[in-house]
Image (cartoon, rainbow, N blue to C red):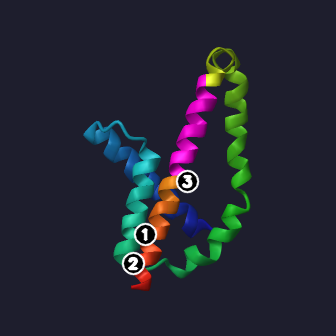
Amino acid sequence: MLDLMLWLLGFQLMGEALTCALGWPLPGPVLGLLLLFVALWLRRGVPATLQRETPRFLGHMSLLFIPAGGALVAYAPLLRSHGGQLALILLASSLITLLVTGGLLKLLLRRRLQ
């Protein structure tokens, strides 16, 4: 699992460094994830250690919700005043993401069958 953590943290660090150095208004972990995708794409595959360890790592993803729960308590007044707007934004962005992902999957499957 150490290999997996090194891959993830390494690419997150690269993303953070690039966004700070270039002044881009993009979260470093998002850029790091894009860099990881490009690296795996250029490599034309996922290393065996990552394939083996990823399912075990995903089993512990619920631990990442602990900081989010703490933030809900810390920002309770803000959520009370703007909770409806935030809920609407989350709903709209989730729906847009679902529609774009479904449309892209449909397009790629159609191209694959040709």
For the residue carrying disc 3, how many other residues have a C-alpha within 10 Å: few (<14), some (14-19), or many (20+)?
few
Q: For this rendering, which residue is in front, 28 or 4?
A: 28
Label 1: element kind: helix
Amino acid under disc 1: Leu
Which x, y percent locates residue 49? 57, 77
Which x, y percent locates residue 92? 55, 39
Amino acid under disc 3: Leu
Q: Spatial distance from mark 3 to mark 2, Cα to Cα? A: 20 Å
Amino acid under disc 2: Arg
For the residue carrying disc 1, how many other residues have a C-alpha within 10 Å: few (<14), some (14-19), or many (20+)?
few
Identify the residue under disc 3.
98
Q: Residue 92 magenta-drawn?
A: yes
> What is the number of the mark on residue 107?
1
**Marks 2 and 1 close (CB-CB < 8 Å):** yes
Q: Spatial distance from mark 1 to mark 3, Cα to Cα? A: 14 Å
- Residues drawn in magenta: 85-97
14 left or right of 71 in image: left
Looking at the rendered image, the quarter that the N terminus falls into is bottom right
